[in-house]
Amino acid sequence: MQTLYINSQNRGSFLEVIKPGVAALGFFDGVHLGHQQVIKTAVKMAKKRNIQSIVMTFSPHPKEVLGNQKVDYLTSIETKKEIFQKLGVDVLYLIEFNREFAVLKPWQFAQNYLVDFQIQHVVAGFDFTYGFRGQGNMETIVADGLGCYGATVIEKIHFKNEKISSTRIRMAIQHGNLSDLPNLLGDFYRTNGVIRNVKKGMNICEINVHERCLLPNYGEYEVEAEIDGFTFRTIVYRIPEDPYVLYMLFEKQSVLPRHHQMIKLKWIDVSIGKSNKLELEII
Ligand SMILES: Cc1cc2nc3c(=O)[nH]c(=O)nc-3n(C[C@H](O)[C@H](O)[C@H](O)COP(=O)(O)O)c2cc1C
Ligand SMILES: Nc1ncnc2c1ncn2[C@@H]1O[C@H](COP(=O)(O)OP(=O)(O)OP(=O)(O)O)[C@@H](O)[C@H]1O
């Protein structure tokens, strides 16, 4: 999958080289089951028309730019790319969201980023909005492009009578409600990190995680860890003294974690009462 990093300055340079396509529109944090429905529909429609499938998304999150709010992302750009690729997307258009872009009127966005980019069809969810103050929506999008493209609206995908959304998933993670996540994300929640210290005698290693990724609340969790392609179930702890470090037990594993190694974690569930060994030993 190719990625085009687009902003208002370099926009023009792409117009001669881009090809027609069907575009899925949205921010897509977490790439949950609702997002996947939007993207899969765009991929299917593009295949049928024999043109490229596109995800058109924005970075950073509009709330960071307009609301000066820090957003703890569910998925980094790199993780999003991996998932889009698996879903069969041909090209990612990553548009820089800044104050200049945010004030575009809905019709200006439609003209400058959809019509000019030869988008033949757009796919988005029932609640997608665009343009200054989010004034454009799926009822206005075709008219804003003067009928140059068509549009497909994806109906609300829900679980237990409530919309699946990035916000709902963030809340579930923050509250440590991890076991429902596969019903929302289609998979367990994942976090990547790097081993920063190994305490061999204690069978504990310390993992540094990126400060901008959302982590479950402080506590003890059952995870599946992957190091060098080797996976095993174990326990990690998150403690308030060091919020972006995870402490992982590796006893009974045949792998010995090493300093600087990359580690991938799948969060399985809270793990109540399985062990309080770490609290006794590190605090
Ligand atoms: C050209 C453009 C301008 C936007 N301007 C605003 C804005 O002024 N205020 C705002 O809250 N969101 C603005 N947004 C963000 C959208 O309302 C919406 O959050 C974004 O397109 C992602 O869609 P999604 O949240 O449905 O994924 C803008 C989006 C686009 C594409
Ligand atoms: N549950 C859903 N069913 C159908 N479409 C959805 C669903 N959730 C999101 N979409 C669509 O996916 C695209 C990306 O949406 P967006 O990134 O706003 O997701 P969100 O989960 O609604 O996020 P947030 O909770 O931050 O509002 C949009 O086109 C949106 O309408």
Image (spheres, grey):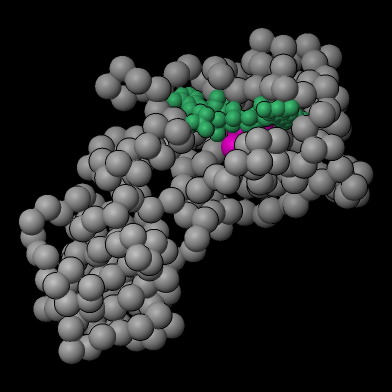
Q: Is residue 142 above or below residue 230?
A: above
81 relative position to 140: left or right? left
Foreground residue, 133 or 42? 133
Q: Quadrant of residue 186?
A: top left
Which residue: 72% across, 22% down?
133
Instruction: Name the quarter where the C terminus is drawn.
Output: bottom left
Q: Is residue 3 visible?
A: yes
Q: Main secondary structure of the magenta part?
A: strand
234 relative position to 22: left or right? left
Q: Is residue 34 visible?
A: no
Foreground residue, 218 or 266? 218
Instruction: Name the quarter where the N terminus is drawn.
Output: bottom right
Q: Position of residue 218 (x, y in %)?
A: 29, 54
Which residue: 82% across, 29% down?
103
Foreground residue, 126 or 154? 126
Q: Is residue 241 above or below residue 167?
A: below
Q: Position of residue 169 (x, y in %)?
A: 38, 37
Which residue: 49% across, 63% down?
210
Q: Is residue 3 above or below residue 141?
A: below
Q: Quadrant of residue 195?
A: bottom left
Q: Which residues are magenta?
A: 23-27
Q: Is residue 169 magenta?
A: no
